[in-house]
Amino acid sequence: MRKRPALAKGLAVVLAALVLSGCSAARYTSTLKPPDDKDLEFGSVRFAMSSFTYERLGVQPSPRLINERARALYPSMFTDDRAGLPVHIDFKRSDSSLSDGSKILLMIVTLFGVVPIPHTDRHDFTVRVGVLDSLGETLCEKEETFEIDVNAWISYWPLGLLPIPGRSDLPREYRVGDLVEWSPASINKVNNHAAECIAGVVVQALKSADQAKLRAAFQERKSRV
């Protein structure tokens, strides 16, 4: 019989921790999805992410992450070998959302944080990719824009852990103790998907290229390296 009071006390402690720390959940939507084909290849032709141009320092995803995700998604296409045809990427990103202070204030003033309050963090990307031969002639190029939204809500109560209605293009995220979009898991999720989308833009550009010219340029470069 003594176990019941102890259990009730334990549940009360857990509930109090949730109430005091806050709860949040998020779903993710993207206007672009990379081609899902690990066996995709262009014969013997290989490509290397050789140069990146960013609008400003510190923008994510980083060149290293884009390289990693490209090679993981399309292992028969991308390489770090110097013989790979060089891929040039020009990349811009803009982020818009309520300030973190505004989110917390909104949670406090709306029914004392009982009702989960939805908000959206929007991430816009513009990518321009190009592949050149050894003479600087453009073999293919493409520009694409896409958007990744983090649709989240927050509450001081466990209601904030309820799944947000609507589809999620990436695995959902739940957080106790701070806002879900503050978490490294959520930040990494957005950056990883953005890197995969950038790799997908390169793939789409290559699909539209003259395949004979790609093969000839690769063989010519390979003979020089």
Image (cartoon, rainbow, N blue to C red):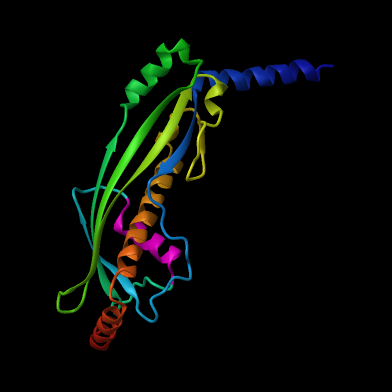
Residue at 48% from the left image edge and 45% from the top image edge: 170
Magenta region's main secondary structure? helix
Q: Residue furthest bottom?
A: 223
Image quadrant assignment for residue 119: top left
Residue 211: percent from left, percent from top = 31, 78
Image quadrant assignment for residue 221: bottom left
Q: Give the extent of the magenta segment.
A: 61-75
In this rendered view, identify the residue nearer to me: 152 or 188.
152
Residue 59: percent from left, percent from top = 26, 47
Residue 156: percent from left, percent from top = 50, 19
Residue 89: percent from left, percent from top = 24, 60
Task: Tell whether 206 sits left or right of 72.
Answer: left
Task: Tell whether 92 sits left or right of 123.
Answer: left
- Give the position of the N terminus as an image quadrant: top right
- Relative height, residue 37 to residue 119 (above, below): below
Count of numbered labels shown in the rendering: 0
- Relative height, residue 62 to residue 122 (above, below): below
In this rendered view, identify the residue nearer to me: 190 or 19.
190
Residue at 78% from the left image edge and 18% from the top image edge: 4
